[in-house]
Amino acid sequence: MYSTSLNAIGEIYHKIEHCLIGTGSLEQVDTVYSHPQALGQCRKFIQQHNIKTVPSYDTAGSVKIIKEMKKQNVACIASKNASKINQVSIIKEGIADNPNNYTRFLVLSKKQAEETQKDKTSIIFSIKHEPGTLFRIMEKFNECGVNLTKIESRPKKDTAWEYNFYVDFERNADDAKISEMINKIKENTLFLKILGSYPAAELT
Amino acid sequence: MYSTSLNAIGEIYHKIEHCLIGTGSLEQVDTVYSHPQALGQCRKFIQQHNIKTVPSYDTAGSVKIIKEMKKQNVACIASKNASKINQVSIIKEGIADNPNNYTRFLVLSKKQAEETQKDKTSIIFSIKHEPGTLFRIMEKFNECGVNLTKIESRPKKDTAWEYNFYVDFERNADDAKISEMINKIKENTLFLKILGSYPAAELT
C-alpha cells in the first residue's frame, strides 16, 4: 500500500467459516491437514476430538491432499466452497473456536470512490520516535471528533526507530473539516499518504 | 497472550537474512521455492533475475524439497542455517529487498523479570468504540512523558465494535509513576492486562 498509485475505494468483510472435510466420519478422523492459521482457529475442536494436526500450505490445497490420500481417518479444514469445488463431503460445519471470524479486504482502483454519507478513510504516515509525536496527531483527530477504526504502528524498514502508522477513520478525506485536519497532521509527520476514502462496510 | 498466565520477561530481535540456496549457479536458476513471505521480501532480486516462484509451507522445508529434486535450475530461499543443516550450498547471500529485516519475539516465563534502568512494558486492553476513548488513554501516556514503541488495534473476536489494543511502552510497570498511570488508564478501559516488564533489546 505504501508504494502503490492505486486508491482504496471500498472495504469487504469476508466471513471465514471453517469446515471439517473428508471421506470418513467424525469418529474415524485422527489426523487433520490445513494451513497453520486455520488449525489455530479450530484449536478447541481439534483438542476435544484428540486429532493430530499436519500443517499445509493453504486450506484449499489441503482438500486436494486428503482427496488423493483416500483415507477415512485423514480429514482437512477448509471452506464450504473448497469442499464443493473438490467434491469431498463436509463432515462438520462451523468448527472454529470463534464463530465470528472475519478478514477485511480493501478494494483498490485507479479511480476514486464517490463520496457517501458513511465513509471511511485509510492513511499511512511516518513519525519520528519521540515522546508526544503520536499524541499530537491523536489530538487533531480528537479535536475534530473523528473516530479511529484502526491504528497500527510498524517499525520502518529502512531506518530503525522511525515508525509507520496505518490509520483508518470514519469520514471522507474530501470533507472540508477533515482535509484541514489532515493538513494539521502533516505538520507532525515525516510523510503522509491518503490511500483513499470509501463507503464503510457493514459486518453482515 | 490474551489468556496466558505467563509473563513477558524479555524481547529478542531476530535478523532475517535470506539466501538463495541450491546446487546450480545463479545463471542456471529459473525456479525458486520458498514461503510466500520470503518470496515477497526478495521480490526485486527475483524480478531482476526473471525467476519463477513456487510457494511452499516454510523456508527451511523448501531446502529439503529442492535437495530431493536434484535439479540445478531449481533453488530456494532460506537462512544460512537451513543451508548448513541440509548441506546444500548458498548461491547468493543477502538477497532481500531490505537488508534490515527483523522479527521480534517476546520471551515468556512463569517468573517476572528483575527491574533494570532500560525497561519496556507490554499491555493489552480493550475499549468501547466511542470517539475520544483512545485519546483519553493516550493523554495519560503523554502526561507521564512515556514513549510508546508499539500500538495495534484489533477488533475483538466475540463482540463487533469493541477493540483490543496491544501497546508497548518504555518504562517498568512497577515504577510508582507508571503504576499510577496504569490505574488512571484502567478507568477508561473495559479490561487491561499487564503482560510484563522486561529489558529493552538493542537492534544489533
Image (cartoon, coloured by chain):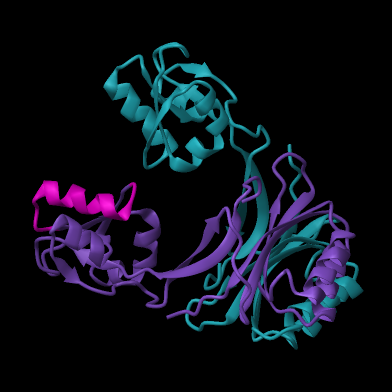
Chain colours: A purple, B cyan
| Drawn side of residue B129 relative to residue B60, left or right | right
Residue A52 visible at all:
yes
Q: Quadrant of the C terminus of chain A?
A: bottom left
- Where is residue B125 shown, x and y percent of the image? 65, 77
Q: What residue sits 61% from the left and 57% below the top?
A: A7
| Drawn side of residue A190 relative to residue A167, left or right | right
Nearest to the observer: residue B37 or residue A14: A14
Q: What residue sits 59% from the left and 36% below the top?
A: B16
- Where is residue A183 shown, x and y percent of the image? 85, 64
Residue A123 sits in quarter: bottom right
- Where is residue B169 shown, x and y percent of the image? 77, 63
Residue A175 drawn above or below residue A164? below
Residue B204 drawn above or below residue A187? above
Nearest to the observer: residue A35 or residue A178: A178
Badge count: 0
Nearest to the observer: residue B184 or residue A11: A11
Q: What residue sits 12% from the left and 46% below the top?
A: A68
Residue A66 on the magenta span: yes
| Drawn side of residue A142 relative to residue B57, left or right | right
Magenta region: which residues?
A: A57-73
| Drawn side of residue B125 relative to residue B141, left or right | left
Residue A86 sits in quarter: bottom left
Residue B80 visible at all:
no
Nearest to the observer: residue B31 or residue A70: B31
Residue B154 on the magenta span: no
- Where is residue B7 shown, x and y percent of the image? 62, 65
Residue B178 drawn above or below residue A60? below
Q: What residue sits 12% from the left and 47% below the top?
A: A69
